[in-house]
Image (tube, rainbow, N blue to C red):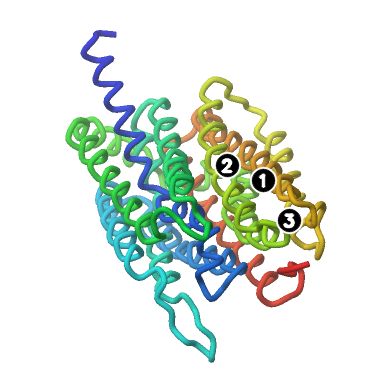
Amino acid sequence: MSELKVHSTRKTYIAFVGFGLGSWVVSDFVFAQFAALMQQTPEGYSIGAYVIVSLQSANIFPMLYMLLNSRQHYISIPTMIWGLLVLGMIACSLLAVFWNSTTTIGGHLHSTALFALIFCGGAVSATSTVVFYPFAAAYPVMFTSALATGESFGAVIAGVLAIIQDVGSSKMNFSVGVAFLCGAVLFLFSFLSFAYLRRQHKSIELVADQELLMEQAPTEHKDVLRVIWRPLLCQWLLAVFSFAVIPSILPILGGKYKNAPVVMKWTSILGMLCDPAARFLSGFYRTQRVELFTVAALFFALWLTVWASYKEPIWCKEKSGGVVVVVANCLYTSLSAFTQTSLYSVLKNIDANHKLAYQWSGFTTQMGALIGTAVIFCLVTLTNAFPSSY
């Protein structure tokens, strides 16, 4: 490989990492701010369930996309990506100003502006899974890994900023609004990275897209699903817990321990740091035994869920008892992130249309998150399955 080609490949890899930053910005920054939000919003320790509903209800957008536009008959993938990144910048900018605005509904205060804007950010996160990865499918698999790395690196940035901010403390170094403004900057960087990819490789992508569209037969979606249903089942199960159950019950579980804001701070931050570390590790060790790793991840997910259902979970009255929550969440996050990234490698090795396989993988993720959210929200808000204090 010539030095010029190596240099071009390196720049493209970096651009994909930058592009990936725009996938989960709103989600990452909201989760990083949980320790502050549960103190400064009317919803208190139940904020997690409301945030997850706001994020996951936006799954209506990838559903409509798959139903009406999965073959790009009306809106092309690049056009969708441009629109999503602009929407993300606008949502984060408005969150920086209106995140603490409240409205009285039924005699109770609610963070309506926060949830409405999180819904807009959720539209970006949800739809990105069905357009970002199919866009990367036209490139070698190393750039799919770069995209996944960029997605998780956004959580690292949000986590590091939360540490600098000292989120949840009585005297934070900067406000929640400033944190969301930083999120808008990440969207801008993602926008510029995508612009570079389109400018440098537009002709290559168009040829690849045309070839993939020409290969698609009317029954190809069914044929692809028949081949990839097992990896998709693993993806669905992990999505149920990663994007719905665990984020909803962690504030409730953490709130039962002494020094609850500190517990939530380190649970969120270290969990975010474990995610990219696990994805980076998958670049050196790519397992095909995704079913086994899925079972291992679900073991810790169920462990956390059961703890949250107890009025007095293990060591809740001990001064450092919250460490067990932090460790368990880190173990689950690491296993889940490693498995989800490995699943893309499995899909790439399957003899099927990779663009459609990636698209269905993203759609399955969002549907798992949506179903999980509906179930856990009802359990948290309408039942006593997860009491909020001991």
Q: Earlier in the sequence, mark 2 or mark 3?
A: 2
**Residue at disc 1, secondary structure:** helix
Residue 78 rendering spot, x and y as whole percentages: 26, 46
Mark carried by residue 305: 3
Q: Circles 2 and 3: CB distance less than 8 Å?
A: no
The residue identified by callout 2 is 270
Give the image quarter of residue 16: top left
- Spatial distance from mark 3 to mark 1, Cα to Cα? 14 Å
Q: Earlier in the sequence, mark 3 or mark 1?
A: 3
- Specify the amino acid type for callout 3: Thr
Residue at the top extreme of this rendering: 2
Q: Give the side of residue 48 with respect to residue 259, left or right.
A: left
Q: Earlier in the sequence, mark 1 or mark 2?
A: 2
Residue at screen point 55% across, 67% down: 39
**Above-or-below relation of 205 to 164:** above
Give the image quarter of residue 134: top left
Residue at screen point 53% across, 76% down: 42
Residue 4 rendering spot, x and y as whole percentages: 21, 13
**Residue at disc 3, secondary structure:** helix
Residue at screen point 67% across, 62% down: 255
Mark carried by residue 222: none
**Residue at disc 2, secondary structure:** helix
Residue 211 rendering spot, x and y as whole percentages: 30, 35
Mark carried by residue 326: 1
Give the image quarter of residue 343: top right
- Spatial distance from mark 1 to mark 2, Cα to Cα? 8 Å
- Spatial distance from mark 2 to mark 3, Cα to Cα? 19 Å
Residue 361 rendering spot, x and y as whole percentages: 51, 45
**Above-or-below relation of 346 to 176:** above
Instruction: Confirm whether residue 227 shows in the render.
Output: no
Q: Residues within 10 Å of mark 3 (few under 14, many from 20)?
A: some
Q: Circles 1 and 2: CB distance less than 8 Å?
A: yes
